Image (tube, grey):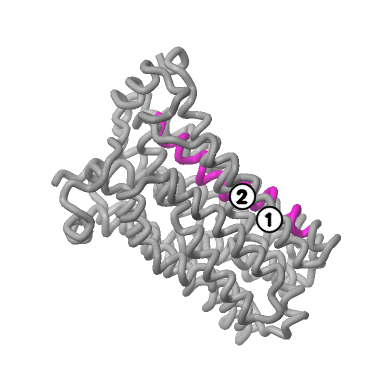
Amino acid sequence: MNGKAGNVRWSIGGLIGLGVIVNYFDRVNISVATHPMMNQFHLSLGRVGILLSAFSWSYTVMQIPIGSILDRIGIKWLNRIGIILWSLATMLTAVAGGMGIVILSRVLLGIAECPAFPGASKATGYWFPLRERGLATSLFDGAAKISNVLGIPLVAWTMTMWGWRGGFWFTAILSLVFAVVWWIWYRDPEEHKKITKEELEYIKEGGAQETGAPEDGVLRSLGFLLTQRKVLALTFGFAAYGYAFGLLSSWIPGYLETQMHMSLLKTGAYSVVPWIVASVADVFIGGWLVDKVIRSGRDASKVRKTFMAIGMILGLTVGLAGFTKNPIIAIIWITISLAGLSMFAPIGWSLPSIVAPKGTVGIVGGIMNFLNGFVGIVSTILTGYVAQASHSFAGPFILAACVLVVGIFFYTVVMGRIEQIQR
């Protein structure tokens, strides 16, 4: 039935994924520019850690407010404004004359981009039935990994050709182009002119979230959700993922340049490998395979929890990457770790649209991403200072593995059954 009903929902899924790719180009550019900025602004590894984390300061603080705003005014308009603002913030980085302006621009970028993932989770809940939720979620979560496959070498090339500032101008212009595309095509299901009646019925009958604001108001809904075991478990469990993923997404290029003494272009080439494997694991294991196993009749909650646990266990191999001087072996361990984390991620991001009561997907996603962003700040800064003090990334990598063990506990023991919370 779904093929005959129409496929507007998949064009929306592709649009959301494209937006995340463009969104992450504006995040990874600072990682690629780490070494040139260190030279121009005379930065230590510790100060680089502060610089890399600046985006997450505002991104984290704004998560719960933005989640509430998403539930109130909707995805369409908030993302329209956000995309234009993050383009301007990236332009500000390109013209920065010192570390202070770069930090300011990254803080502004964090504010502008904070609706991206809660909004993507909310839109996926609106547009896709439960039986397609895993693959649909992997389209935008996998896009975050694909953005590194495309973005790191592309931005490295533009910075090699036109300097590190040229890389920021390139991503800013790309974001403005996407703003036009989003403005034209994104609508909620009920107001999209291209959707058929059959497809709309297929989406709703399949268990899609209903559009609309929280029934009890934002503050009452927030207070209620913060007392729910499922919300707390998915929040702390996802934060463990965020710690390890934040370390790897921020520090792979810097790690290869400083500890493995690679050139900028070689760093870009080596960094692509883990992200290619991560992209495949995200879409085909965390997305397609999980949906396939659930459709076969297996218990959906057990399937999701099993795949999440396996993914986080594989993520523990990040602890081995700091103990080798061979870049190929280091990349192998990082690749296994990122693949595991990536097969976990789309399942984790699908949970707000599954467990949240009506009208609160944005709030639940904001709560989850708030702590995720906070530990990302800690991870990024702590990694820089510990690596600087010990002249090695072994300590930070081991700590990331230990944090993942805590995450496994929350998802497998504390979470309980994955199903919608009843008011």
Residue 410 position, x and y percent, is 31, 58
Prevailing secondary structure of the magenta residues: helix
- Marks 1 and 2, how far apart at CA: 8 Å
Q: Is residue 137 magenta?
A: yes
- Describe residue 144's horizontal placement relative to residue 157 as left or right: left
Q: Amino acid at mark 1?
A: Thr
For the residue pair 258 and 111, the one nearer the viewer reads as 111
Label 1 belongs to which residue?
171
Q: Is disc 2 surrounded by few (<14), some (14 to 19) or many (20+) residues within 10 Å?
A: many
Evaluate if marks 1 and 2 touch, with contact meaning CB atoms under 8 Å apart: yes
- Residue at x-position 30% and y-position 38%: 211
Is 408 rendered above or below residue 97?
A: above
Is 146 rendered above or below residue 333?
A: above
- Residue at x-position 59% and y-position 39%: 181
Write the start and end of the magenta stretch as one range: 132-156
Q: Is residue 418 visible?
A: no
Q: Is residue 106 magenta?
A: no
- Residue at x-position 69% and y-position 48%: 150
Residue 65 position, x and y percent, is 34, 61
Checking the image for residue 366, the label placed there is none
Question: How many marks do you count on the picture?
Answer: 2
Q: Secondary structure at mark 1?
A: helix
For the residue pair 235 and 310, the one nearer the viewer reads as 235
Q: Is residue 253 visible?
A: yes
The quadrant of the rendering that contains the N terminus is top left
Residue 357 position, x and y percent, is 22, 44
Label 2 belongs to which residue?
22
Residue 270 position, x and y percent, is 74, 57
> In the rendered structure, which disc, 1 or 2, sits on the residue that comes first in sequence?
2
